Image: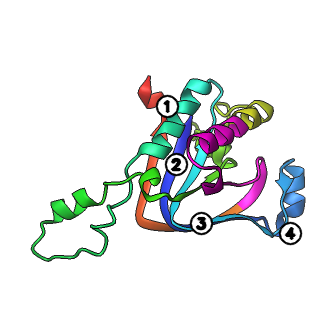
Amino acid sequence: MRAVIQRVTSASVTGTAPSHSLILQKLKLDIVNQNQISRIGKGLCVLVGIGTDDTIKEMNYIINKILSIRLFPSSKDIGEENDSIEREDQVQKEWKQSIRDINGEILIGNKSSIHLLAKTKKGNKPDFHKAMKTESSKTMYEELIRSIKMSYSEDLIKEGQFGAMMQVQICNDGPVTMIIDTVDTQ
């Protein structure tokens, strides 16, 4: 399982423009109208990729990382600017708090699951063989959402629509982007 975690000041998920409807129907992708599906303020935008070999163990590892990784400065360090402070000290202050510590929101998207696990080693066309099949992936994604809501706060977790082509808009803060991969833990 792989997660791309981005620290954001805001993020939203909107349905795809109607001009893409015929293409999406041919690709057998769900079409979501142009209405906004979800929106968050300060927090994390997380794109999750679910692989063929992923289990509850990998899912729990990813959830723990999402909730525990320290990507935010402490509130007392925000706005503290002192020219005499070394650059290294300023960088150290950047990584003090987790999403739990700041009580931030989390927007989780899944459509990237196919794209996050695509390989382009041979040629230029992405190979999606490592991505979990749709039905199994949907079950795992729904369990991930349920589990992270139970572990954190149901009100602070927002999501996209599974299997739909959507537009994700983010205002990346920093920018800070981390990739967590359960393959690295084996």
Residue plotted at (49% across, 31% down):
182
Q: Residue 4 — which label?
A: 2
User: Camera-side residue: 99 or 108?
Assistant: 99
Q: How far apart are the alpha carbons under marks 1 and 2? A: 12 Å
Residue that mark 3 sits on: 11
Rounded to the nearest angstrom, the CA distance separating label 1 from label 4 is 36 Å
Verify whether residue 30 appears in magenta. Answer: no
**Which amino acid type is shown beneath numbered disc 4?**
Pro
Viewport quadrant of the C terminus: top left
Label 3 vs label 1, nearer the camera: 3
Determine the CA span between mark 3 and mark 1. Answer: 25 Å
Left or right placement of residue 171 versus residue 82 in this view:
right
* Amino acid identity at mark 2: Val
Q: How packed is label 2: few (under 14 Cα within 10 Å), some, or many (20 or more)? A: many
Number of labels in the image equals 4
- Indicate which disc residue 18 carries: 4
The answer to whether 72 appears left or right of 107 in the picture is: left
Marked residue nearer the N-terminal end (1 or 4): 4
For marks 4 and 2 on the same chain, the one whose residue lies earlier in the sequence: 2
Range shown magenta: 141-166
Disc 4 versus disc 2: nearer the observer: 2
- Residue 61 is left or right of residue 23, and the answer is left
